Amino acid sequence: MSSDDTSRGTPPVERQRMDVDIVCVGFGPATGGFLTTLSRELANTDGTAKLESAVMPGAPPQIVCYERADDIGFGVSGVVTRARGIRGTFPDLDPSQIPLVAPVTHEKLLYLLDHIGASRRSLTLRLADKLIRGCRRMLPYDAEAVELPYIPPFLRKEGGLVLSLGQFNQWVGSQLLGAGTVQIWPGTPVAAPLVDGNRVEGVRLLDQGTDKNGAPEAAFMAGMDIHAALTVVADGPVGPIGAQIDRQFGMPAGHHQRDWAVGMKMVVDLPESCTLEPGTVWHTFGYPEPGLFGFLYVYPGRVASLGIFVPSWFDSPVRTAYRNLQHWMLHPYLWRHLNGGTLRSWGAKTLAESGQRGEPHLVGNGYARIGEGSGSTNVLTGSGVDEAWTTGVQLAEGVIELLQKKRPFTKENLEAAYVNRRRASWVEREGRVAKRARDGFHHGVVTGLVGMALAGVSQGALHLPLKPRRPRDHTPALAEYYRGRIPRDEVDRICRECAARGVSSHNALMDRAGWPAIPYDGRLLVSHQDALLMGGKVQAPAGCADHIAFLYPELCEICGTKICIEICSAQAITPGGNGVPSFDREKCIHCGACVWNCATPHPEDPERSVMELRAGTGGLHSAEN
Ligand SMILES: Cc1cc2nc3c(=O)[nH]c(=O)nc-3n(C[C@H](O)[C@H](O)[C@H](O)COP(=O)(O)OP(=O)(O)OC[C@H]3O[C@@H](n4cnc5c(N)ncnc54)[C@H](O)[C@@H]3O)c2cc1C
Ligand code: SF4
Ligand code: SF4
């Protein structure tokens, strides 16, 4: 039996074993769709088995789901969704029954101009801005922004819902737990898949009572081995189990995960004066940097979910999502609605945005992949929740079919029962349209927008003949990025001084490059650390190994950009001794941004970086994100 866990130096220990029929890794929308669909077919209303367990004959199949976070409602997302798959599962869905859900009422696509003059704009954009300002009386121009007169159909969410992922997951989970047919265990990270030859046999849970290197301490408790006929991998965009399976079985030829984004958000109590109606959906681009996208969705009760995405193509080694989010909120078009508001909740997470190009092997002997980690997120429509949910439903339908026919969960059977369903569905069809829609962004924002429009309008028939590049291959060094704005020796001096103080350099560099200081108000505009305390309530139980690993410290020592420090969503990575960053588990929110953004390719696999996100406990404690 092999697993990465053993190769990480954990000494051989006695492990307890449990046998179930199906084990799921992670409780997000994908598993929500899977378990909701499956649970309806497990038992009759009188509690007798509709389908029979192989490990507990006479009883319904034993289904267990392990979630890393301390609650099933601690996910992070926008969300606006057309909710086709979700409504398919709940045809009588009454949005008013779920907190922080509203039907979409108004949608706007906004181009934000730079009223400060500090962003890096191409000549084309600078000319466009001049033209817009010159013709503003003839345009839908307001407060340094232009509302695009037309939202392409592929972006519209008319008829859909805005919702809080945390609240939605809790609502789904409470129904599942109420029905009593499946078990969901939050606060239980899965450390590794149990792999035997070409078959996944289940999962190993995280060891507890260890030091930060994973070595047993006095209260050591070896993670249990859970054996199952089917392992459902639904651990999201940076899931360690999906990553270990990819390393074990490889990716399909030509597939890679070069596109991703860091999404950082806040949930805000809007000021009483705010007139934005529930169901309002705004998407923005253009500011604080042209390559950053923003969103604002309004829930009932004068609460908004808002944030920005820092995408892989963003050509800046100073990639801080937090400072950029604050400048975005302060844009005049937005700030007039937000001024006087209060931070309720804050969070960040990455999105796997390679779509079908990033699709791993969807099934193998004994396992199946669903949700964002399976390449379901649609990069053209900006939609991941409903797609993830739907892939979960498709797997559940396939599993029910196999259980009814008493067929084993082999690769071939799962291909026929699950993958074929997925290939015949709207998730696949629309994923195909989106497949090359974003290639242009690696060559500039305007090129990217043109490519997206081309793919969207032509239904994927046309696309720009450009190849996606690995972000680290085109992210410039700091001195190069600031050339013409900050002299090279000053960039070096700022970085040296910040490193000596043990802090990232982005704030000092952005100040020097002309970005005004953030006027902290102690309510909505707060320091990064205050956001962690007020809005994220980050926790990390003691007694577990560090879940962020610098695999090659000697490469970190010579790394010039140290981009992992600049991007870290929670100031959990800071300059350390000998040039190797240090990691503070207490602050980490498990967003995965550092792993995607790390500037150095793995010596054995250029598609990977030299950082690894492993299974870990804790993270954000907020059910509103
Ligand atoms: C800021 C932001 C805004 C977004 N906006 C939108 C939007 O407007 N509309 C939209 O449709 N989508 C949006 N998305 C994308 C959407 O959130 C995802 O596509 C969706 O959540 C994917 O669902 P999933 O179930 O595949 O994975 P996730 O929701 O990521 O769930 C995976 C779960 O697995 C758990 N897990 C990971 N590792 C382990 C482990 N080792 N052991 C146990 N559990 C583990 C995680 O804690 C997590 O709960 C947004 C995302 C972000 C970050
Ligand atoms: S983890 Fe990556 S980005 Fe960070 S210092 Fe090491 S090599 Fe550089
Ligand atoms: S250290 Fe944690 S919080 Fe920081 S970027 Fe990495 S995963 Fe996110």
Image (cartoon, grey):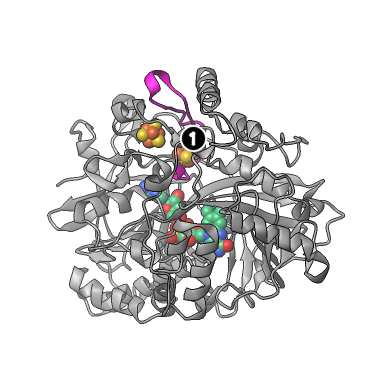
> Which residues are the magenta region?
572-593
Residue name at image x 50 percent, y 31 percent? 586
Residue 584 position (above or below residue 223): above
Give how far across and how far down residue 397 sits, in percent: 36, 76
Residue ranking furthest to the right:
273
> What's the residue type where badge 1 is placed?
Leu
Residue name at image x 76 percent, y 35 percent? 519
Badge 1 element = helix
Residue 429 location, quadrant: bottom left
The one nearer the camera, 36 or 305, is: 305
Give how far across and how far down residue 608 sits, in percent: 31, 46
- Residue that carries the numbered disc 1 in the rendered image: 478
The one nearer the camera, 119 or 517, is: 119
Is residue 169 visible from the viewing direction of this image? no
- What type of secondary structure mainly makes up the magenta span? loop
Residue 460 colored in magenta in the image: no
Which quarter holds ligand 2? Answer: top left
